[in-house]
Image (spheres, rainbow, N blue to C red):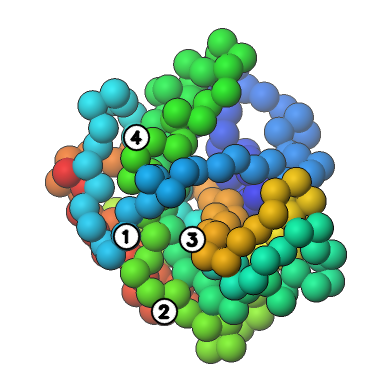
Amino acid sequence: MNYAEHVRELPGVWGGDPVPRERLVPTEPVFFIKPDTALLRNNDPFYIPDFSEDVQYECELVVRINRLCKGIEERFAHRCYEEVGLGIDFTARDLQRRCKAEGLSWEMAKGFDHSAAVAPEFVSKSELPGIQQLHFSMELNGERRQEGFTGDMIFGVDRIIAYVSRFITLRIGDLIFTGTPVGVGRVAIGDRITAELEGRKMLDFNIK
């Protein structure tokens, strides 16, 4: 929940009665963890798992940590990464809805195998505009579905890193997905996902 327009679409995404926006917008970053088995690399195809009938995409800017970071101050957080990329946070939305309705943790809806597609290559931040001035987009079967601008984030990248590092020591190679813009939706067998960061194609893979 790091882009206001995505926050507005969440009641419809989650199902149930509408929730006032002021009750959805977080006052602090909300984070969860995916295990390393969730990684989907090298534009390998994503296979829809048999335990979900509603897997949805969420395209996000991804930051790769390059040093040990514990309790880092926000003003120093930029030292913790040199490269950024794009990723898809796949979510088993039907499982998430069920878990939320029962007041349970919804980790199984987010952390299942290959639920974190990551671009094969990352880009040095020295080759890009400032971290909060980046544009990215995602297409499904050639149709633009999501457009993000990091300047619209509720919590900037450095704030996220500082906040998470208060609770969890960040290690070299850790990946931080920074939230998705409006436009999340379902994938189906035969679909193709592509995504660009500042005009560079970062992702291009099939759904099977």
CA gap between label 4 and label 1 equals 18 Å
Q: Amino acid at mark 4?
A: Val
Comparing labels 2 and 1, the label whose residue is closer to the camera: 1
Disc 4 is placed on an element classified as strand
Q: Amino acid at mark 2?
A: Gly
Q: What x and y, as percent, mark residue 156? A: 72, 62
Of label 3 and label 1, which has the lower sequence position? Answer: 1
Residue 14 visible in the displayed image: no
What residue would you read off at disc 1?
41
Closer to the camera in the image, 66 or 186: 66
Answer whether labels 3 and 2 touch (C-beta < 8 Å).
no
Q: Is residue 208 above or below residue 40?
A: above
Comparing labels 4 and 1, the label whose residue is closer to the camera: 1
Residue 172 visible in the displayed image: yes
Of label 4 and label 2, which has the lower sequence position? Answer: 4
Comparing labels 4 and 3, the label whose residue is closer to the camera: 4
Q: How many marks?
A: 4
**Residue 199 circle label:** 2
Q: Amino acid at mark 1?
A: Arg
Q: Residue at x 62, y 22 (%)?
A: 18
CA gap between label 3 and label 1 equals 22 Å
**Residue 147 circle label:** 3
Q: What x and y, as percent, mark residue 143? A: 30, 57
What residue would you read off at disc 4?
55
Q: Quadrant of residue 165?
A: bottom right
